[in-house]
Amino acid sequence: MDLKLKKLKLSRKAVLFSLISVLFSVLFITIFSQNFNTLYEDRIPGSNIRIKVIDTYVRNFETYLGDSTQVSTYRTLDAITNYSYNKHKFFADFNSFNKTFHDCMICNRVDCSNVGSDSCGLGLYYLDARLRNITTLSNQQLNINTTYHINSISIEQRLAFEVEVTINISYNITDNSDEKYYAKWSKETIITQPVSIIGLLEPTGNINDSTDRYNRTIKRYKGICESNDACWNAVNTEEFYKDYSFRLYQNSTSFLQRYWNDNSPSSCCGIETILHPSELPVPPDGNRSYIEHYYWNDAYTCSGGKTISVYNISYDNVSLDSGTAARYGLTDSDVVGIVCR
């Protein structure tokens, strides 16, 4: 959990500095433009400088939108995991998950059409609140009026350890400095923002767990076998096990699929880890493989006709199916017991 909190703090700082940079840069240009116009108003029209001020704000607005999307997405995924854990219920499918994700980002409720629906618990970190923050400040401090409408929000996954969020937004930015209205911008744009999942709770186990023993967060394996499946042996497997990390494995499921309990393989984004007995209900079910996406979905079990053996990994008794054990370079000499054949 410390890793997650650290990640959130870093994200908050990033957006805070982004906001500060937007305001200071525009305020600096505003002050400069006022002085410049006073001294040289007979040479350069003040309207030209004011237009540059607003143009700078416009460009920074989209930067702030991207940064805010990153923070809001991270917080929303964390909130949805906790929401699903409290309900002990998976989403029906991707569309159901994506709608809840969209609504949490827009209104901080799981269903924006129902004012009585559950809160997502995001405080002021949902996307619409972040945008209202910058538009209010720009109006109060810079005499720039900003109106916007978020047309759509969608999330997908193309890489194992990050998601990609696409925002379609329309906005109008108008100069309110006096009655002349020097400039007005109207634009519809699409922002695509990659967001790391490092530090987030792994959904499947947390939604399934009713004992509060499992709180595994996403940590990327950085060992020598990260991109070389042929190098696994008992030593490297122990290192991976002790690191509590996840590795890319194409026959596993992606991070997002876990929210609707989709067990189909993801060639781009499948990840897996080996569970520790201390994370599992007491006593742990040794009749199933401790590979997390197998364990939580009742796959690779004795009743499913798999051979399950107990292996000594870092002094723990870890149940693994024979196919997984072979993938990780474990041999009969590492076996301390046979559960089923």
Image: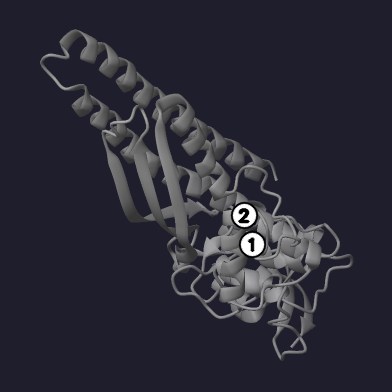
Q: Residue furthest top?
A: 39
Residue picked out by circle 2: 107
Is 75 in front, or is 230?
75
How many neighbours does mark 1 have within 10 angstroms: few (below 14), some (14-19), or many (20 or more)? Answer: some
Q: Is residue 116 above or below residue 47?
A: below
Residue 97 drawn at (x, y percent): 61, 69
Identity, as a three-letter code, of the amino acid under mark 1: Cys
Q: Is residue 240 above or below residue 37?
A: below
The secondary structure type at the circle numbered 1 is loop
Q: Is residue 338 left or right of residue 58?
A: right
Q: Quadrant of residue 90?
A: bottom right
Tell me if residue 164 can be seen.
no
Residue 217 drawn at (x, y percent): 65, 54
Identity, as a three-letter code, of the amino acid under mark 2: Cys
Is 136 in front, or is 78?
136
Identify which residue is drawn at 34% across, 27% down. Answer: 178
| CB contact under 8 Å: marks 1 and 2 | yes
Tell me if residue 162 can be seen.
yes
Q: Residue furthest front?
A: 179
